[in-house]
Amino acid sequence: MKAEQVADSSSWDGLSRRMLRDETLLVLALSLGASGVSALISFVGSVTKPGGLKDQAATLNASAAPGRPWLDLAWQLFGIATALVPVALVAHFLLRERDGRGLRTLGFDRTRPWTDLGRGAAIAAVIGSTGIAFYLAARGLGFNLTVVPEALPDVWWKYPVLIMSALQNAILEEVIVVGYLLRRLGGLGWTPGTALMASAVLRGSYHLYQGVGGFIGNMVMGVVFVCLYRRWGRVGPLVVAHSLLDIGAFVGYALLAGKVGWLPTA
């Protein structure tokens, strides 16, 4: 059975639709739904600020304690760990289901590591190249802020933290916005098409702080990821792809910023 499909209410061990709805809303309110609202507020602030969007910057991985590297590291690790708490909550909810398989229900496990890695790398290769081109075009047209993927101090933990941040983003987004959300919306009786659009719009919404380009680009990516998830029944390849994309963006920016002319900097 694919993740978004359910047979009847008994598949959920007696949970009513109201309970499923409330559970889903609470998970989103504690994670990416709240991020979507925050991004919308940030976007409103950007478009109402004098000057164009491309003259403003959106910084992703910034220092939390400038000039105090050990305290900064503690804050970075704290932020990464707490951001994954909603994933643990989702795993808890999934374990309560009749099959008790937890995140394995969504295909987030180690049963097919090489398949997931190969598929994820292929997805990242295709989306990465088109994504960079789309971002540069959107920024050039004034639809996007200048995205600064990292602004961490040049210390020994910089690259490990950037990689961990990328992994955290990938796990959080793909588990919740694809696997979990589609499964719950299926349990609530949503049609596949409506559930797909809800997932894609949610993904676009919490990237709106980057501008219109960030919203549209990530919404399109969301459609692609939902289609691939439904085809394969696994979020594993999507987590791999997303991790590689973010690692490339974070680490690549750290290595290339100010050294190549085509990469915009704040």
Image (cartoon, helix red, strand yellow):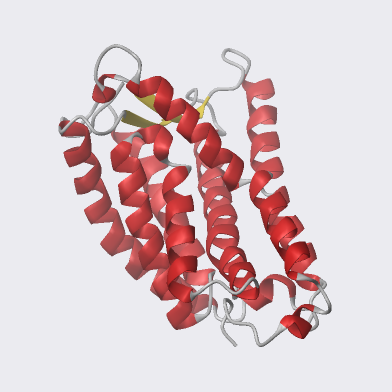
Image: 266 above or below 262: above
Question: Quadrant location of residue 215?
Answer: top left
Image height check: is 187 above or below 87?
below
Q: What residue is drawn where x is 46% and y is 71%?
A: 117
At 47% from the left and 24% from the top, the residue drawn is 154
x then y, percent, for residue 119: 40, 74
Write down the quadrant of residue 145 in the picture.
top left
For the N terminus, which image quadrant?
Answer: bottom right
- Which residue is at a point 49% across and 28% down the rendered structure image? 41
Q: On the rendered structure, is 113 left or right of 71?
A: left
Q: Relative to residue 66, is residue 147 drawn left or right? A: left
Q: Position of residue 78 (x, y in %)?
A: 70, 35
Q: Tag count in the figure?
A: 0
Residues 6 and 149: in front is 6
Q: Quadrant of the C terminus?
A: top left
Q: Nearer the viewer, residue 183 or 9?
A: 9
Q: Measured from the top left, where is residue 199 in percent x and y?
A: 48, 60
Q: Residue at x 42, y 56 (%)?
A: 244
Is residue 140 left or right of 17 when viewed as pictured? left
Query: Is residue 10 depicted above or below 244 in this figure?
Result: below
Estimate the x, y position of residue 87 in percent, counting from the top left.
Answer: 68, 56
